[in-house]
Image: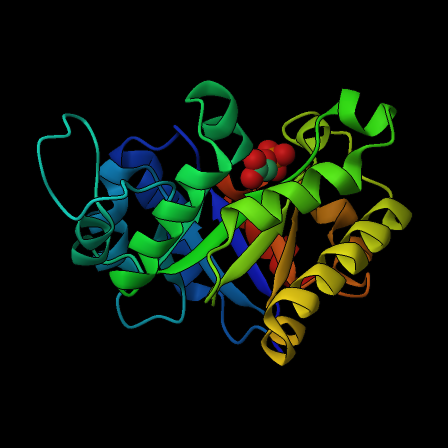
Amino acid sequence: MRQLIAGNWKMFGLTAEAVAIATPLLEAGALTRDLLVCPPATQIALVSRLLAGSPVAVGGQDCHTETHGAHTGDISAPMLRDAGASYVILGHSERRQNHGETDSLVRAKTLAAVAAGLTPIVCVGESAEERQAGWETAVVGKQLNGSLPDDFAGIVAYEPVWAIGTGRTATEGDVAAMHLFIRQALVRRFGPAGEAMPILYGGSVRPSNAASLLAVPHVGGALVGGASLKASDFLDIARA
Ligand code: PGA
């Protein structure tokens, strides 16, 4: 299966910046990996129009559990879809930490995303303290159990919290062990469908380390933060 390189722009991207990041992706030419960009909500419609007709997909970074209603400041999955998104990142550690998102909330958002026709990318990952204590698989296993609905059909992203935005990438051995653990958990729960579910790695992916990370067994692609804000770096990762 083709690997997916997903760019998570986080809270970056005024209009001129969004245009500057997205436009060069139109000239990427044929790639062996699929590309996805997840701009801030304010730029999804613009970036979708810019990339229309290209193979680059667009996604959101979060959605509400409801389709509409009195939820000031929130954005629903059908709204993301309407703006041109086909994917949505859910349960990112920055949402879990800064917005108190629980596994059950992430599961409800995942159901809402699928109902709206979006492909969910559900993020899991342990903190530095949890890894130091040797709890990483217990933590990730619990997040998977709680965050994925029973009929899950989407993408999982393993993002160790200590590797996000730190320049400290997980070693290939750490990634291999965790991706195998996640694969086994997905197969136990979802049967043969679990064999094919992409598992992305995220956390300080750069052009310099992408080739080795993407070669690790059970790594189905990358979720890229900082390096996705520069089109040339993002494309170098896609070509790594
Ligand atoms: P990073 O972010 O690539 O800047 O470490 C990854 C992410 O948070 O998705």
Quadrant, the N terminus: bottom right
Quadrant, the C terminus: bottom right
Residue 156 sits in quarter? bottom right
- Residue sticking out furthest to the left: 70
Q: Nearer the viewer, residue 226 or 25?
A: 226
- Residue sticking out furthest to the right: 173
Left or right: 160 as drawn, with respect to 92? right
Left or right: 132 as drawn, with respect to 208? right
Q: Is residue 168 above or below residue 180?
A: above
Q: Nearer the viewer, residue 181 or 199?
A: 181
Q: Residue 104: x percent and y percent?
A: 44, 40
Q: Residue at x 70, y 25 (%)?
A: 166
Q: Residue 97: x percent and y percent?
A: 52, 22
Left or right: 191 as drawn, with respect to 71? right
Q: Residue 200: x percent and y percent?
A: 63, 55
- Image color mode: rainbow
Q: Nearer the viewer, residue 147 or 117?
A: 147
Ligand 1, image quadrant it occupies: top right
Q: Is residue 62 something that shows in the picture?
A: yes
Q: Is residue 233 something that shows in the picture?
A: no
Q: How many marks?
A: 0
Q: Residue at x 69, y 46 (%)?
A: 141
Q: Nearer the viewer, residue 52 or 214?
A: 214
Q: Is residue 131 above or below residue 90?
A: above
Q: Residue 16: x percent and y percent?
A: 28, 35
